[in-house]
Image: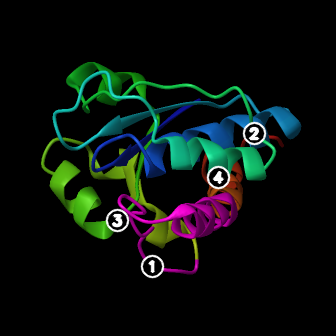
Amino acid sequence: MKVLFVCTGNTCRSPMAQAILQRKAKEERLDITADSAAIMMTYGERVNPKAIEALKKLGISGFSHTSQPVTPRLIDESDLIVTMTWQQRAALATVVDDEKLVAFCEVAPFGDIIDPYGGDEEVYDKCAATLEKAVEYLISYLKGRFSLGN
């Protein structure tokens, strides 16, 4: 199964979620791959260095990704598209089937994943910690909805 994470610029939240899910899927031996993309038309930007440092604090090193916009190909290749905010979900709902689309706030018991862009190291660390918890909820959701790991 393939999960596509989507945020605004694809340099902070969605690549962190991608890296976290990849690690957790490997740890749990789940057949899940992940990718990430932007609502905005961004191409080739590297992951924010503060996001990379926040991932390292979670024990994830060696992750690299370059930004890309959401495309019809990425949508078609994905089994589930996960947005960081309800607003992003609403924007994608015009081009993505509803059963293929979910916002983190629908699967985790907290609201939108706040954008750390422009924040200090502490803001990125907090975002990464929130994403780590959100991905745990997402994995439970995936196991139930798609019968993964059963």
Q: How is the image coloured?
A: rainbow
Which amino acid type is shown beneath numbered disc 3? Thr
Badge 4 crowding class, 10 Å Cα cut-off, few under 14, some 14 to 19, many 20 or more, is: many
As helix, strand or loop, the secondary structure at mark 2 comes to: loop
* Residue 67 relative to residue 80: left or right: left
Along the polypeptide, which appears first: circle 3 or circle 1? Answer: 3
Quadrant in which the N terminus appears? top right
Crowdedness of circle 2 by 10 Å Cα count: few (<14), some, many (20+)?
some
Callouts 4 and 1 close, C-beta under 8 Å: no
Q: Is residue 111 above or below residue 123?
A: below
Q: Quadrant location of residue 60? A: top right
Q: Label 1 belongs to which residue? A: 111
Q: Viewed as shown, does residue 54 lie left or right of 2?
A: right
Q: Within 10 angstroms of label 1, few (less than 14), some, or many (20 or more) residues?
A: some
Q: Distance from label 1 to label 2 (Cα)? A: 25 Å
Give how far across and how far down residue 135 sits, in percent.
64, 56
Q: CA distance from mark 4 to mark 1?
A: 21 Å
Q: Quadrant of residue 75?
A: top left
Give the residue number, with chain letter if any, for mark 3: 85
Q: Label for residue 60? A: 2
Say which residue appears at 87% left-offset and 38% top-offset.
27
Residue 147 sits above or below residue 87 on the image: above
Of residue 77 and residue 7, the one placed in the foreground of this image is 7
| Left or right of residue 73, residue 29 in this image | right
